[in-house]
Image (spheres, rainbow, N blue to C red):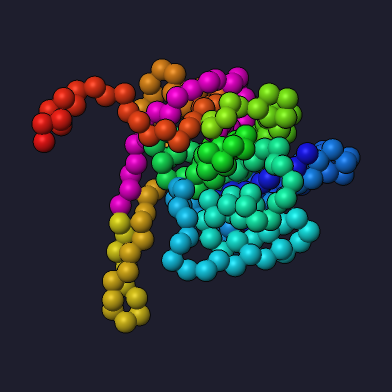
């Protein structure tokens, strides 16, 4: 078996390294699987499913079976599946993300974007995200344990073709697992204006990091608000079930 790992926080991110170390311990050292990590050289949060097309990319093997790409998470997926790996990939895990991917987050997330792209390419895929308050120190232990159990399930019973699983795992005591749909995220975004030493404006896309969303029944927010793990099946189909379009035929 061959397990492919990536993320959007960068190849040195704690969540990725903890999960990778545990998978190598449980699978690679016992001769059960080969673990290959192909991850961005630099943080790529918000990269979604972006591809780098207007500049060349660099790929470096910094350790055995650990590759860094100076591109996006989706670049990493393409490098791995089209160039680096000759064997069939059993599954891809993207993460563990240093923060939640809930509701509208999934449209922006490089973590989820990588999983969706791999699923589109026929690879069973899982995106893992740690949910914690920004005032807390992130503790990845729950997410790592869930990732190990999920790996076993992905081997024996992978998601249907084209579907990626997005799992959001809270810190603290887990009260269960719920199958959910993405809810509605409430953002407190702003554009922060600063001045450089030459008096010129520069800008940061900013927010206060508050985890806020509409707590509708059956959503990922409802699950996390009750300290349950949220499991959301996702695909790349952007088609909306909306039928009131007859007037558009007359344009």
Q: Position of residue 22 (x, y in %)?
A: 77, 42
Image x and y of residue 48, in percent: 45, 48
Query: What residue occupies the far top of the structure in this picture?
Result: 217
Q: Position of residue 231 (x, y in %)?
A: 55, 26
Magenta span of residues = 164-190
| Left or right of residue 100: residue 251 | left
Figure quadrant of residue 227: top right
Judged from this view, the residue extending furthest toward the bottom is: 198
Q: Left of 32 or right of it: where is 39?
A: left
Q: Tell me if I can see residue 106 in this picture.
A: yes
Hey, which quadrant is residue 202 in on the image? Answer: bottom left
Foreground residue among 249 and 147: 249
Vertical placement of residue 170 versus 78, above or below: above
Q: Is residue 152 magenta?
A: no
Q: Which quarter of the figure is the C terminus placed in?
A: top left
- Is residue 39 positioned above or below 31 on the image? below
Tell me what residue is drawn at x 68 percent, y 34 percent: 147
Q: Residue at x 29, y 64 (%)?
A: 193
Q: Is residue 87 above or below residue 174?
A: below
Task: Judge by depth and name the residue closer to the eye, 54 or 232.
Answer: 54
| Left or right, 36 with reference to 233 | right
Q: Quadrant of the N terminus?
A: top right
**Residue in front for this viewpoint, 140 or 102:** 102
Q: Nearer the viewer, residue 170 or 93?
A: 93
Residue 207 % position (x, y): 37, 50
Furthest toward the front, the residue is 250
Q: Residue at x 79, y 45 (%)?
A: 34
Left-right relation of 241 to 86: left
Q: Is residue 150 above or below residue 84?
A: above
């Amino acid at each position: 078996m061959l397990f492919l790992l990536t993320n959007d926080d960068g190849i040195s991110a704690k969540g990725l390294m903890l999960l990778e170390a545990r998978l190598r311990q449980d699978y690679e050292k016992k001769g059960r699987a080969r673990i290959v990590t192909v991850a961005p050289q630099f943080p790529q949060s918000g990269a979604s499913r972006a591809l780098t097309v207007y500049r060349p990319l660099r790929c470096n093997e910094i350790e055995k079976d650990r590759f860094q790409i100076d591109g996006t998470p989706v670049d990493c997926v393409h490098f791995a599946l089209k160039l680096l790996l000759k064997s069939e990939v059993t599954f891809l895990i993207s993460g563990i993300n240093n923060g939640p991917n809930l509701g509208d987050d999934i449209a922006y997330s490089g973590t989820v974007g990588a999983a969706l792209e791999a699923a589109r390419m026929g690879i069973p895929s899982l995106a893992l995200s740690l949910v914690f308050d920004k005032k807390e120190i992130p503790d990845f232990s729950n997410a790592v344990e869930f990732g190990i159990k999920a790996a076993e399930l992905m081997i024996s019973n992978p998601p249907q073709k084209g579907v990626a699983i997005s799992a959001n795992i809270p810190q603290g005591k887990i009260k269960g697992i719920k199958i959910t749909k993405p809810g509605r995220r409430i953002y407190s975004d702003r554009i922060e204006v600063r001045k450089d030493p030459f008096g010129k404006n520069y800008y940061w896309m900013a927010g206060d990091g508050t985890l806020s969303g509409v707590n509708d029944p059956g959503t990922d927010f409802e699950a996390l608000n009750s300290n349950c793990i949220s499991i959301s099946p996702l695909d790349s189909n952007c088609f909306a079930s909306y039928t009131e379009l007859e007037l558009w035929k007359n344009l």
